[in-house]
């Protein structure tokens, strides 16, 4: 195998690093690149998520027996991306090993942006019949497949540059992309929903955020490629710290850690779509306030979530990441008892649900990525963290809007509390098991010494 393959770096990438060798990338620049990259990914997904409530039930699924059924169909398509994401990770890991990180990112982000932008041109069911949901499903699968390839290792590079006593703070930085991406998507949809008639919004207004998504992906691509071409990134590759490993090899070494990592952030990921996508569907279907005004409440919630993500970094450095995640899961479990009643309490209760929910989400979600990668040894961290992240999103968040709306519409809103607390219990059990395994391992090593 050639050196280029071993180092996951093409000759052009290595030449670019030589050009930039006298311009080291600071941790601050890496952080900005990470946030921009994550924001672009979340923006793409949230643009689709919001449209799956506001647009696609009417435009793509008008044949459904009721508005609730149409939204459930839309949420079923929403889940497809999370099924495709692990497949994308496996395929793009192969591209990474053979053609380099820059090639992988370029292909992945153009597929991601192209899939999202293509939705902007999608005709409705009344125009092309069942081709409309078929094409929507295809583009959604493209989003998920590409997102699997968008894993760049920059969060790991940032963590490697973190001081020993600031690891929690550095771990939360990539998570800032989620509230930024959600806020931007909500602002765009809110603006058009408030300022256009319902018919104009459904005809053409909703399409603009999908165009914006492609432009944001181009900016994010250049921000990422600048760091991939840096001396620091090249050094990490040469030290095999960000080298992609075959998935089968990684699973042979860290298979159990993948399972633990997939379930550790379950409380946070279950909460994720229950304060972003699901409540918009509930308000749209069952009332309380207009969708446009509710989107701006969600922007305010995202701002609160942004602040608590930052706070989570300081808390993790002071308390430890495992304890921070445990506290977050317990708070989510407590919130699960009040969440259904808030959504049923009219506009004031719904607004409180969003603000409180985002505050809790930020505290938990801020350390979720660190929990995914912390158990992997250095040679397998890049591949292990990528696949574990895919599986944790699939298990925790992929079907959350579909399951929550299905349960709430059939059996009552109280059942979303049960959904939340089940995720919190899983996280608590996994964290306790992980601690027991770590303690047992430390005892064994001490005895061997």
Image (cartoon, rainbow, N blue to C red):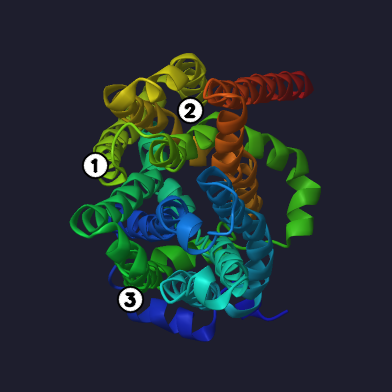
Residue 367 visible (yes or no): no
Residue located beneath label 1 in the image: 293
Instruction: Nearest to the eye among marks 3 and 2: give it.
Output: 2
Helix, strand or loop under label 1: helix
The answer to whether residue 289 is above or below residue 39 is: above
The image shows residue 313 at horizontal and vertical percentages of: 36, 32
Q: Nearer the viewer, residue 20 or 268?
A: 268
Q: Which mark is residue 20?
A: 3
Residue located beneath label 2 in the image: 321
Cα distance, mark 3 to mark 2? 35 Å
The answer to whether residue 60 is above or below residue 194 is: below
Helix, strand or loop under label 2: helix
Q: How many other residues sit within 10 Å of disc 1, few (<14), some (14-19) or many (≥20)?
A: few
Instruction: Nearest to the eye among marks 3 and 1: give it.
Output: 1
Q: Nearer the viewer, residue 1 or 86?
A: 86
Q: Kindly indicate the quadrant of the structure image that contains residue 230.
A: bottom left
Residue at 44% over, 43% down: 277
Q: Is residue 360 left or right of residue 107?
A: left
The image shows residue 378 at horizontal and vertical percentages of: 60, 49
């Amino acid at each position: 195998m050639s050196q280029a393959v071993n180092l996951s770096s093409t000759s052009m990438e290595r030449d670019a690093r030589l050009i930039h060798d006298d311009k080291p990338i600071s941790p601050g620049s890496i952080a900005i690149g990470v946030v921009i990259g994550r924001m672009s990914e979340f923006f793409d997904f949230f643009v689709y998520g919001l449209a799956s409530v506001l647009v696609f039930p009417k435009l793509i699924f008008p044949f459904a027996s009721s508005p609730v059924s149409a939204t459930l169909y839309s949420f079923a398509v929403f889940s497809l991306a999370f099924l495709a994401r692990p497949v994308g990770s496996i395929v793009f890991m192969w591209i990474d090993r053979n053609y380099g990180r820059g090639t992988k990112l370029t292909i992945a982000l153009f597929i991601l942006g192209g899939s999202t932008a293509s939705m902007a041109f999608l005709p409705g069911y009344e125009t092309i019949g069942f081709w409309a949901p078929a094409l929507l499903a295809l583009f959604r699968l493209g989003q998920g497949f590409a997102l699997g390839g968008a894993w760049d290792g920059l969060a790991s590079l940032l963590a490697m540059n973190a001081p020993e006593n600031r690891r929690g703070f550095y771990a939360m930085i990539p998570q800032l992309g989620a509230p930024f991406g959600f806020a931007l998507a909500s602002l765009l949809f809110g603006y058009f929903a408030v300022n256009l008639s319902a018919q104009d919004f459904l005809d053409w207004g909703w399409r603009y955020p999908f165009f914006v998504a492609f432009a944001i992906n181009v900016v994010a691509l250049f921000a990422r490629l600048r760091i991939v071409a840096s001396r620091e990134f090249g050094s990490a590759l040469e030290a095999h710290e960000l080298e992609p490993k075959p998935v089968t090899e990684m699973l042979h070494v860290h298979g159990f850690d993948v399972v633990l990592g997939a379930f550790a952030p379950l409380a946070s990921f279950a909460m994720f779509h229950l304060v972003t996508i699901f409540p918009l569907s509930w308000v749209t279907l069952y009332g309380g306030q207009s969708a446009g005004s509710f989107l701006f409440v969600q922007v305010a919630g995202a701002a609160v979530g942004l602040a608590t993500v930052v706070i989570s970094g300081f808390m993790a450095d002071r308390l430890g990441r495992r304890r921070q995640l445990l506290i977050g899961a317990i708070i989510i479990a407590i919130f699960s008892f009040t969440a259904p009643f808030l959504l049923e309490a009219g506009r004031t209760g719904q607004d409180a649900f969003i603000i409180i929910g985002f505050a809790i989400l930020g505290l938990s979600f801020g350390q979720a990525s660190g929990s995914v990668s912390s158990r992997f040894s250095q040679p397998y961290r890049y591949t292990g963290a990528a696949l574990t992240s895919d599986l944790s999103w699939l298990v925790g968040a992929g079907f959350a809007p579909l399951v929550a709306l299905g349960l709430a519409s059939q059996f009552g809103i109280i059942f979303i509390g049960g959904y939340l607390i089940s995720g919190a219990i899983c996280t608590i059990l996994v964290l306790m098991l992980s601690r027991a395994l770590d303690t047992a391992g430390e005892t064994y090593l001490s005895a061997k010494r």
